[in-house]
Image: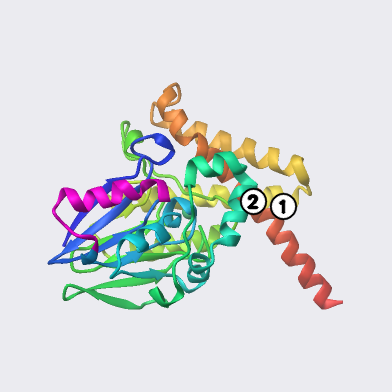
Amino acid sequence: MTTHTIDCDYLGAPGVAAAYLLEAGDELAFVETNTTRALPLLLGALAQRQLRPEQVRYVIITHVHLDHAGGAGALMRACPSATLLAHPRAARHVIDPSRLVQSARAVYGDERFEGLYGEIVPVPAERVRALDDGSTVPLAGRELSFLHTRGHANHHFVVHDSEVGAVYTGDAFGIVYPGLQRGGLLAFPSTSPTDFDPEAAVAAVDRIASLGATHVYPTHMGRYDDVAGIADQLRPLLEVSGAILAEADSSGREGADLDAFCAERVDALFDDLLTGRGLGADGRARALVDIDRDLNGQGIAAAVRKRRYKRALHGRDLQ
Ligand SMILES: [Zn+2]
């Protein structure tokens, strides 16, 4: 099995998000699709190697966030023999992406949405296969296994290729930008909206680390061989994120006050991280993490609101 890393030029920059092309014998699979805007890059990766779209047996998405699955429909249309493999809770959103599109448009506005994602093409239901935890699928006589990993998103799985010792980790094993690996390894978790759950996220990191893999491919991005090193960085950062969540929750802050509190705490966390690697004054490094900084703060605030909502529902049940 050969893995080709395709830089999807996400947000118009290199080194931000990847899709992976798995080549095994004459069978192919894509892991992640990025957005519809990346389709020429994905098809170009085939053409460059004299491979044909008809050889693509699977299109795999780790979860439905649009930098992973936004291009799934367009890629499936271009690869007529492919089956789309997704988490059971993700499958319905690729078959009918209207809710995804609606919430992304609400976050980004119509113009920015068009620029980032382009058209989101639905995938015909008969071409989608939902995979339970522990499922396996064959690829050129080998086996890929699928492990459900909550914490970043409830509809997230990772793909384990035990024969070569690789795990395609989506967003469940941190963000590891190549451009930040200058003062030693630097990995941090994505706590973006709307499903962030710190305990589940640590459990996912532990589960991936315990597979005995020799390397991981986070979607943000590239191949990394220091699997234990990444896990060791993610656990304490997830704990701090959980502590910010708990403090924000118990503080009783609401609305813009809650958002500002989470943003401030997460900003400080990122400042410490960059400073610790000698990147505190590096404009390029700061620009690279700016989007995650914002998203991580928003995700923790969203998790506070979700917790409160659940408690309110539970309280009502008890009355
Ligand atoms: Zn994600």
**Residue 131, located in which quarter of the rendered image?**
bottom left
Amino acid on which the number 2 mark rests in the picture:
Leu
Where is residue 307 drawn, in percent x and y?
69, 61
Q: Quadrant of the C terminus?
A: bottom right
Q: Quadrant of the N terminus?
A: bottom left
Q: Residue at x 28, y 76 (%)?
A: 137
- The count of marks equals 2
Where is residue 285 drawn, in percent x and y?
41, 29
Residue 35 visible in image? no
Give the answer, above or below, for where 33 lies relative to 317: above
Mark 1: few, some, or many residues within 10 Å (few <14, many ≥20)?
some
- The answer to whether residue 38 is magenta is yes
Image disc number at residue 245: 2
Q: Is residue 25 left or right of residue 104?
A: left
Amino acid on which the number 1 mark rests in the picture:
Asp
Most distant residue in the right direction: 319
- Magenta segment, prevailing SS (helix, strand or loop): helix
**Residue 108, located in which quarter of the rendered image?**
top right
Where is residue 102 drawn, in percent x and y?
62, 55
Q: Where does the magenta region start and end?
A: 36-53
**Element at label 1:** helix
Kindly indicate whether the residue at mark 1 contacts the one at mark 2 (C-beta within 8 angstroms). yes
**Residue 173, located in which quarter of the rendered image?**
bottom left
Q: Nearer the viewer, residue 27 or 181?
A: 27
Image disc number at residue 77: none
User: Which residue does the numbered mark 1 point to in the structure image?
Assistant: 249
Q: Residue at x 36, y 57 (%)?
A: 32
Where is residue 247 drawn, in percent x and y?
68, 48
